[in-house]
Image (spheres, rainbow, N blue to C red):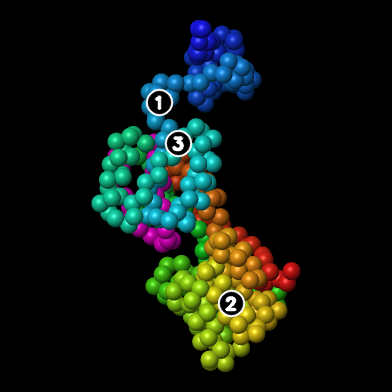
């Protein structure tokens, strides 16, 4: 039995009633064509089940339609949502993403960078397991690079970061709105970028509203154990508080457990907020946590959009904050 012949670009052009060159431009998004011409060509391609040859497409466009992503986030806590968001944007242009895990190893990172450049990727996204800054990649041979979640130290680079101070202000505003005024902050290590910027933004925002913390921010590990311990410290010092802003959902869950053990009810006695909106923690907490969502998928989409513009010759250097969102649950507003 003879196999059916695969449709070619000439077949598409003939069915659409245009030249081969016009059909190619319509399918590759090049040139200035009328909308009805583009629609007619694409309809013909769909009707014939036309599949463009990737190698020919790359050769003609001078691109490989691949993007590399280098991360140090081994467990994928932050890089996977970023990857999903980036693929949402890049996939619309039929671009593929090659994920490389550098594991905080400079030698491994250089190996991945050489491999990606050897594959002639059109661009690179760099991300990691924590916010903050990092040194720029070594020479990328003119390939556009966008840093996502963490920022490059070079102002000439393009970086998309989460607006953590803005997220902290959202949490503070929410607690003020529900009538809380005696607020404590329990967060991560003082040397950690996220712990520091979230606490500083919270203090400044509350001060502008005429509210001071009941005690200086309590810094410790990013863990439930530290949340429980911090409640013990507040109780030992007989500090009165009606709300706690936590630097992470893990800490907030530990705080909720400790408050329950001491007979205090959340949110009736103490309103509680987390940060990161990590579903496996925030939804399993008792009660479920109000939290700040950094919208990592949206951040990934934004980074990919900026990378596409850079690939097209329109780079956007500088730091681009991506807004966070407040997700309200039972830990601040009774069900």
**Residue contact at pointers 1 and 3, CB within 8 angstroms:** no
Quarter-of-image position of residue 269? bottom right
Give the label, 1 or 2, closer to the camera: 2
Q: Which residue is mark 3?
A: 96
Label number found at residue 187? none
Quarter holding residue 115 = top left
Eye-nearest disc, 1 or 3? 3
Q: Secondary structure at mark 2?
A: helix
Mark 1 vs 2, N-terminal side: 1
Residue at 60% x, 65% y is 284
- For label 1, the residue is 58
The reply, left or right, for residue 220 in relation to residue 202 is left
Range shown magenta: 122-141
For disc 3, the neighbor class at 10 Å (few under 14, some 14 to 19, many from 20) is: some
Read off the residue under disc 2. Answer: 257
SS of the residue under disc 3 = strand
Can you give x and y, in whole percent of width and height, for residue 74 in the image?
39, 55
Q: For the residues carrying marks 2 and 3, which lies nearer the camera in this image?
A: 2
Q: Are marks 1 and 2 in contact (CB under 8 Å)?
A: no
Quadrant in the picture for the C terminus: bottom right
Compared with 63, 154 (above or below) is below
């Amino acid at each position: 039995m003879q196999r059916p012949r695969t449709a070619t670009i000439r077949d598409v052009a003939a069915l659409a009633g245009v030249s081969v060159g016009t059909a190619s431009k319509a399918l590759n998004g090049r040139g200035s064509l009328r909308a009805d011409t583009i629609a007619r060509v694409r309809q013909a391609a769909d009707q014939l089940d036309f599949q463009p040859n990737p190698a020919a497409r790359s050769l003609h466009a001078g691109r490989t339609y691949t993007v590399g992503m280098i991360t140090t986030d081994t467990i994928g806590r932050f890089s996977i949502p970023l990857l999903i968001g980036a693929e949402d944007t890049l996939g619309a242009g039929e671009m593929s993403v090659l994920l490389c895990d550098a594991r905080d190893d400079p030698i491994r990172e250089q190996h991945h960078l050489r491999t990606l450049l050897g594959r002639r990727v059109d661009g690179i996204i760099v991300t990691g397991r924590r916010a903050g800054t990092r040194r720029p990649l070594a020479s990328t041979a003119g390939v556009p690079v966008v840093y996502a979640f963490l920022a490059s130290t070079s102002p000439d680079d393009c970086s998309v970061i989460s607006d953590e101070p803005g997220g902290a202000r959202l949490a503070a505003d929410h607690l003020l709105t529900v009538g809380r005024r005696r607020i404590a902050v329990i967060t991560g290590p003082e040397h950690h970028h996220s712990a520091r910027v979230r606490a500083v933004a919270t203090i400044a925002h509350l001060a502008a509203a005429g509210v001071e913390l009941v005690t200086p921010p309590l810094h410790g590990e990013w863990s439930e154990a530290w949340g429980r311990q911090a409640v013990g410290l507040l109780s030992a010092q007989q500090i009165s508080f009606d709300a706690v802003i936590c630097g992470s959902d893990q800490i907030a869950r530990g705080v909720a457990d400790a408050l329950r053990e001491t007979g205090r009810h959340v949110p009736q006695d103490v309103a509680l907020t987390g940060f990161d909106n990590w579903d496996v923690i925030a939804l399993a907490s008792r009660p479920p946590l109000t939290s700040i969502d950094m919208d990592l998928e949206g951040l990934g989409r934004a980074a990919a959009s900026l990378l596409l513009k850079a690939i097209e010759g329109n780079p956007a250097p500088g730091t681009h904050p991506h807004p966070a969102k407040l997700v309200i649950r039972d830990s601040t507003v009774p069900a």
